[in-house]
């Protein structure tokens, strides 16, 4: 069994991710992404995607949220919310999945879009057989 979010928790994370998305810097793709990480103390850390004219430097909203949380002293995450304009709602890219797995293998994720569609999934299902510290033998 994997962790699940309550409807109220999911709604809150979607609202937080939507606020985060307002800060997205996307002059090249025009694809705005907002992410919200729920911490065990109930607080939320937001992230948005930040692009660069040197395209390879673009960073995803999810990884911005992770590094912001870690830089603030938080290494445990309870849930993640992600919002885009995609239908169906888009899931985190592979690089973000691996980054999230570093800190939370059993992470409930709520995926949403601006049209009001919402889905729940778990990081375990998005990234089975994640590379982990156990593999470093
Ligand atoms: N992007 C994210 O923010 N998260 C993902 O999981 C996938 C892609 C961003 C990166 C880039 O700024 C834009 O979406 C288009 O790829």
Image (tube, rainbow, N blue to C red):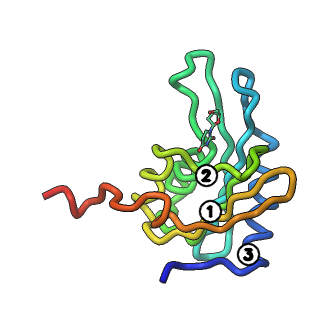
Question: Which residue lies under the disc numbered 1?
Answer: 80
Q: Mark 3 points at which residue?
A: 9
Q: How crowded is mark 2: few (under 14 residues within 10 Å), some or many (20 or more)?
A: many
In percent of the image, x 56 and y 20: which residue is there?
55
Mark 1–mark 2 distance (CA, rounded to whole Å):
11 Å
- Looking at marks 3 and 2 on the same chain, the residue that comes earlier in the sequence is marked by 3
Residue at 47%, 71% in the rendered image: 106
Alpha carbon distance from label 3 to label 1: 10 Å
N-terminal of the pair, mark 1 or mark 2, is 1
Observer-side mark, 1 or 2, equals 2
Does residue 87 appear left or right of residue 103 in this picture?
right
Q: Say what secondary structure mark 1 lies in.
A: strand
2 up-or-down from 59: above or below: below
Q: Circle 2 sits on which residue?
A: 91
SS of the residue at dot 3? helix
Q: Position of residue 122 (x, y in %)?
A: 54, 68
């Amino acid at each position: 069994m994997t962790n699940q979010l309550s409807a109220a928790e999911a709604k809150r994370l979607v609202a937080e991710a939507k606020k985060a998305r307002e800060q997205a810097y996307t002059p090249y793709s025009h694809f705005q992404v907002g992410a919200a990480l729920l911490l065990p103390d109930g607080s939320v850390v937001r992230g948005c995607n930040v692009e660069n004219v040197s395209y390879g430097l673009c960073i995803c909203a999810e990884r911005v949220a992770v590094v912001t949380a870690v830089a603030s002293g938080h290494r445990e995450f309870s849930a993640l919310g992600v919002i885009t304009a995609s239908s169906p709602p888009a899931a985190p890219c592979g690089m973000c999945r691996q980054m999230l797995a570093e800190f939370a293998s059993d992470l409930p994720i709520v995926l949403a879009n601006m049209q009001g569609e919402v889905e729940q999934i778990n990081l375990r299902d998005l990234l089975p057989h994640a590379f982990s510290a156990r593999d470093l033998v």
